[in-house]
Image (cartoon, helix red, strand yellow):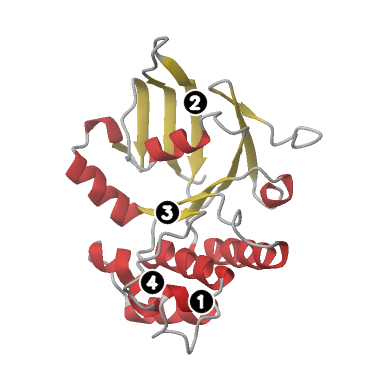
Amino acid sequence: MTATLLTIDGLTKSYPTPQGPLRVLDRVDLRLAAGESLALMGESGSGKSTLMHLIAGLDGFDEGTLRLDGIDLSALTDATAARLRRERIGLIFQQFHLVPSLDVAANLALQARLAGRFDGAWCARLIERLGLSGLERRFPEQLSGGQQQRLAIGRALAARPALVLADEPTGNLDEEAADAVLKLLLELIDEHGCALMMITHSPAVAAPLARHYRLRRGQLFDVTHAPALT
């Protein structure tokens, strides 16, 4: 039986507003096994990014428990949460968030070096698999959008994380580039054996992932076996 990597029970998060607290997540429960893939869908403002930020230890929550690989995130200081994020979580964003002053090779290795887990052979393999061979000394502004997102994927995987969190990773790309980036991401995730949670608005992007969940009014629904992802 595959071990559970992520355990969420009764997770609740609210934000203050002039009208009073706005509950964005309402007693969310979730399990994600090591090596498993999950698509997280929902309308804008439904709490998808909030949930991902909580899992990444980027924000605190009001109630419930959240454990990653057995570690209780509510018990972590900001420093230990940052260390956990560097070592066990790979983050991929729609906006790439590459460092403009670093070349391709340095951008790819950045998180792995910060985590003290740099492996030159693994990074070289990633460069090749990402189709970036020969571009190691170029800077992000010299790359196409698809190349920048492939580089962001490589950076997320360079430290060999247990979990990759991807927030609309193909949202800024044209259809052809988006299809190629998604295919490559899923191939690398499968090769590495890490778990993947991906936020997406697209049923087509969600389709290849093993499980499908939808956030609606702060509550999480399993729609993996629903007739349509709508």
Q: Secondary structure at mark 3?
A: strand
| Pointers 4 and 2 in contact (C-beta within 8 Å) | no
The structure residue drawn at horizontal position 57% and vertical position 63%, both measured from the top left corner, is 185
| Disc nearest the viewer among 4 and 2 | 4
Note whether 26 is above or below 141 in the view shown.
above
Name the quadrant containing residue 58. top left
Camera-side residue of 199 and 96: 96
The structure residue drawn at horizontal position 51% and vertical position 76%, both measured from the top left corner, is 143
Q: Residue furthest right?
A: 227
| Disc nearest the viewer among 1 and 4 | 1
User: Which amino acid is tagged 3?
Assistant: Leu
- N-terminal of the two: label 1 or label 3? 3
Q: Residues within 10 Å of mark 2 (few under 14, many from 20)?
A: some
Q: Which residue is mark 2?
A: 29
- N-terminal of the two: label 2 or label 3? 2
Q: Which residue is mark 4?
A: 108
Q: Which residue is mark 3?
A: 91
- N-terminal of the two: label 2 or label 1? 2
Label 4 vs label 2: CA separation? 34 Å
Name the quadrant containing residue 90. bottom left
Q: Secondary structure at mark 2?
A: strand
| Pointers 1 and 4 in contact (C-beta within 8 Å) | no
- N-terminal of the two: label 4 or label 2? 2
| Pointers 4 and 3 in contact (C-beta within 8 Å) | no
Q: Which residue is mark 1?
A: 143
Label 2 vs label 3: CA separation? 22 Å
Name the quadrant containing residue 52. top left
Q: Residue furthest top?
A: 19
Q: Secondary structure at mark 4?
A: helix
Q: Where in the figure is residue 64, as x and y percent of width and height?
A: 37, 21
